[in-house]
Amino acid sequence: MVNVSRENKLKTLNKVLGAFYKKGEEALFRCPRCDHHKKKLSINIEKNVFKCWVCDWSGKNLYRIIRQYGDNDTRYHWKSFQDKIEIEKFSHKLFAGEEETAAANLSLPEEFISLANSTLPSTSIYPLNYLKSRGIDKKTIIKWKIGYCPKGEYASRVIIPSFDKKGEVNYFVSRAYDGGWKKYLNPKVSKNIIFNHPYINFDEDIILVEGVFDAMKAGDNSIPLLGSTLSEESKLFNEIVRNDSVLYLALDPDATKKTNKLISLFLKYDIRTHVVDISGYEDVGEMHASEFFKRKETAALLNSNNYLLSRIMRI
C-alpha cells in the first residue's frame, strides 16, 4: 500500500533539493548546506530526521529543510500533508497547578470598553494613565485591543483579550490600575492556549515571555506563558515543534527553574533555542524595547553540549 504522505514529502524534497536515490529506508540528496558534489544528505521520512555525512548538518524535523530552502508554496504544501506529530505523553496536567475548564463560552465582560475607540468616557483617563506609566502607547493599545471595565466584576481593571484561530475569545488578562489588593483577576479557564494565535507566525522567530506586558515590549511574535509552564501535551509546544520554530526564551530572571525545564524540553526535540539575558530587570516589561532587541540580537544559541556545560559551571 502506497504511503501518500511519504510520497508527497519525497516529491516536495525532490523539488527543493533536486534528484535523489533510495538506499533502504533512506533517501540521499545533495546537501544544500555544504553543497558537496555527492549525495551525502541522508533523509529518513518515517523517522522525520536528516543528517549530512560530510558537514554533519542534522535535525529531527524535516520541515527545517523546507523552511530554510523552500519557497512559500512548498512550505504551505508541506504543512498541508504533514502528519500530526506524535509526542510522548507523560503528564496528566497540561499546566501545573491550574484549574482547567473549557473556554468554549468565554466572552469579554459586559462592561468592557475598548480603549482603541475614537471617543471615550471620562473614566478612561485612569486606565490610559496606567498604561502610559508602563510605556504602552496608543499604537500598542490598538494592536492588542486593550480595553477596561469601569464597573462590574472587573471594575478598575485593564483587559487584554486573546483570540483563537477562529477569532473567538479564548482568554483575557485583567490587571488592576487603581492599586487594588489583587493585581490580576483572570477567568478560571484553561491556559492551554496560544495567546492571540491569529497574529503569530511560527515560521518566524518566536519569543516566549512570562506575561502580556512583557509580550508588548518584546514585539511581534511574542507569546506570554501567563505564569504557567509548558508540557509536551500543550497546544503551544506542539505548534512550535510542528513548525520547527526558532525560539527565544525571555523569562523573568527569578524563573531559572522554569527556564531550565523549557530548555531541556525544547532541546529534546531539537528546537533551536536562545536565551535572552534579562539580568538587571525584574522582567521584559520593565525594559525599553530597544534594550530588549539589543539583547535578543546577542542571545546565545544553545545546544545540548553548551547547555550542560553551563549548568555544570553553575554548580
Image (cartoon, rainbow, N blue to C red):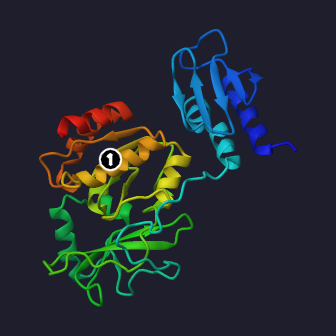
Q: Nearer the viewer, residue 99 or 68?
A: 99
Q: Does 96 sit left or right of 315 as displayed? A: right
Q: On screen, 152 above or below 114?
A: below
- Residue 305: x percent and y percent? 35, 31
Q: On screen, 251 above or below 146?
A: above
Instruction: Name the residue rendered at 69%, 22% in the picture.
Output: 28
Which corner quadrant of the image does residue 37 belong to?
top right
Q: On screen, 194 above or below 115?
A: above
Name the residue beneath numbered marker 1: 249
Residue 205 appearing in the image: no
- Residue 314: x percent and y percent? 18, 39
Q: Residue furthest right?
A: 1
Q: Amino acid at mark 1?
A: Leu
Instruction: Name the residue rendered at 85%, 42% in the picture.
Output: 2
Residue 240 appearing in the image: yes
Q: Does 243 sit left or right of 8 as displayed? A: left
Q: Nearer the viewer, residue 228 or 257?
A: 257
Instruction: Name the residue rendered at 41%, 48% in the picture.
Output: 265
Q: Residue furthest top?
A: 37
User: How many discs mark residues in the rendered view?
Assistant: 1
Q: Nearer the viewer, residue 216 or 53?
A: 53
Which corner quadrant of the image does residue 31 belong to?
top right
Q: Does 22 sit left or right of 273 as displayed? A: right
- Would you call the spot at circle 1 few (<14 residues within 10 Å), some (14-19), or many (20 or more)? many
Q: Does 277 sit left or right of 190 as displayed? A: left
The local secondary structure at tag 1 comes to strand
- Residue 263: x percent and y percent? 36, 45
Q: Residue furthest bottom?
A: 152
Image quarter of the C terminus: top left
Image quarter of the N terminus: top right
